Image: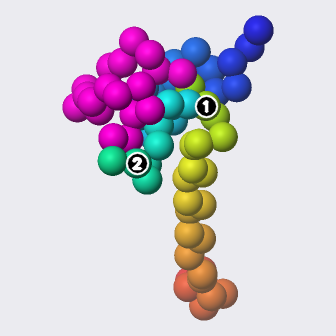
Amino acid sequence: MKKLFGKNIETACEYCQNYNPGAEFPCELGREINANGKCKKFNYNPTLRTPKAEAVMMQFSKEEFEI
């Protein structure tokens, strides 16, 4: 089975199935969020990932390309 975002998924609590941002303890399993992002109970959920912002294209005029 091929993973949706490849094999090298960055471990982050925000992408975990057990993450609940509105709760007193963000981890539903009662674990503390580690600074290094390592957790044995990490269960990746691709629907929690937020898309990266698109690059802003600069606007040029024809005069800028004239010699």
- Asked if residue 31 is positioned above or below residue 15 in the image, the reply reads above
Dots 1 and 2: beta carbons under 8 Å? no
Give the residue pinned by disc 1: 45
Q: Earlier in the sequence, mark 1 or mark 2?
A: 2
**Extent of the magenta region:** 25-43
Three-letter amino acid code of the residue under disc 1: Asn
- Residue most toward the right? 1
Horizontal side of 59 relative to 18 (left or right) equals right
Horizontal side of 52 relative to 4 (left or right) equals left
Comparing 63 with 3, the one in front is: 3
| Residue 29 part of the magenta-drawn span | yes
Please report the residue visible at 69 percent of the width from the left and 18 percent of the height from the top: 3
- Residue most toward the top? 1
Which SS does the magenta portion mostly show? loop
Which image quadrant is residue 1 in?
top right
Instruction: Report the mark closest to the observer, 1 or 2.
Output: 2
Comparing 35 with 32, the one in front is: 32
- Asked if residue 37 is positioned above or below residue 52 in the image, the reply reads above
Horizontal side of 11 relative to 16 (left or right) equals left
Three-letter amino acid code of the residue under disc 2: Ala
Please report the residue visible at 56 percent of the width from the left and 25 percent of the height from the top: 44
| Residue 30 part of the magenta-drawn span | yes
Please report the residue visible at 33 percent of the width from the left and 20 percent of the height from the top: 38
Give the residue pinned by disc 2: 23
Can you see residue 7?
A: yes
Q: Is disc 1 surrounded by few (<14), some (14 to 19) or many (20+) residues within 10 Å? A: few
Q: Find residue 9 and report its horizontal and vertical position in percent.
A: 51, 24
Q: Find residue 51 and report its horizontal and vertical position in percent.
A: 60, 51
Comparing 1 with 17, the one in front is: 17
Please state the total of marks drawn on the protein image: 2
